[in-house]
Amino acid sequence: MKKIIASITAVIILAILGALGINIFRNMGPRDREKAENGSTLVVEELSWYNHGEKQAGKVWKPGDENGNFSDSLGTRPVAMFFHDPMKGAYAESIVKRLASQGVIGYTTSCPEKSKDIESLIKRMGKQSFADQDRIFIIADTYAADAVVKAMLNIGRRTAGLVLIEPMLQGKSAVTAKRYGNEILSISPEQKGEAFSLMEDYMELRGAFK
């Protein structure tokens, strides 16, 4: 009877937290492992975000050691957060997997519609035990780029870099992107074939691989 009461209480508490709009990060799915192109092992986990009872699903790729495990003893690592167009999740995953094989934590999620949700997600990522909050890089593609640039007005220079792939910017976000100038790497459709190498050079100059 006590176990039943405890279970019901836990469910009620979670429901209240969701109703209050409290954001919670937690690993949900089972830990998995994948092989990167260079043969290294990547540890893959689900990392989900809750706000107002709605789940913002995402996946995180961590570089594995010789035993195929991610060790916290290695200290915090740079993070590349890829906010992608809902229809382009496979492309985002391919990019962050390549970055993870070089020691960067990769994270992908479908881009939230509201700028404040993007801001909250970036801030909370910086508080994760594995994340170097001074080396958080943001990547966004097509329509997601517009929402991410708007969020940058408040996130500002707390991010180590911003990469926009085939960005579709409108109004205020287009003006903001121009204001940041060379601090933003903008990759055009004509450059997409060399997107990863351009991104790699840009991130290296900003300390991603040190």
Image (tube, grey):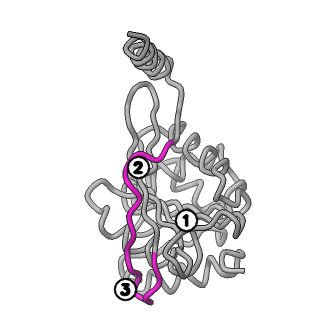
Q: Does the magenta stretch include residue 56?
A: no
Q: Which circle marks residue 111 in the picture?
A: 2
> Disc 1 or 2, which lies upstream in sequence?
1
Q: Which circle marks residue 80 in the picture?
A: 1
Instruction: Answer with left or right where residue 17 lies relative to residue 57.
Output: right
Inter-mark Cα distance, 1 to 2: 14 Å
Q: Does the magenta stretch include residue 37?
A: yes
Q: In terms of secondary structure, where does tag 3 sit?
A: helix
Q: Which of 34 and 185 is in front in this view?
A: 34
Q: Which of 210 and 145 is in front in this view?
A: 210
Query: Start and end of the magenta stretch?
Result: 26-41
Quarter of the rendering containing residue 52: top left
**Amino acid tagged 3:** Gly
- The residue that appears at 42% across and 74% down in the rendered structure is 95
- The residue that appears at 72% across and 76% down in the rendered structure is 207
Q: In terms of secondary structure, where does tag 1 sit?
A: strand
Q: Do tag 3 and tag 1 residues touch (Cβ < 8 Å)?
A: no
Give how far across and how far down residue 173 sits, in percent: 52, 51
Give how far across and how far down residue 37 sits, in percent: 39, 86
**Amino acid tagged 1:** Ala
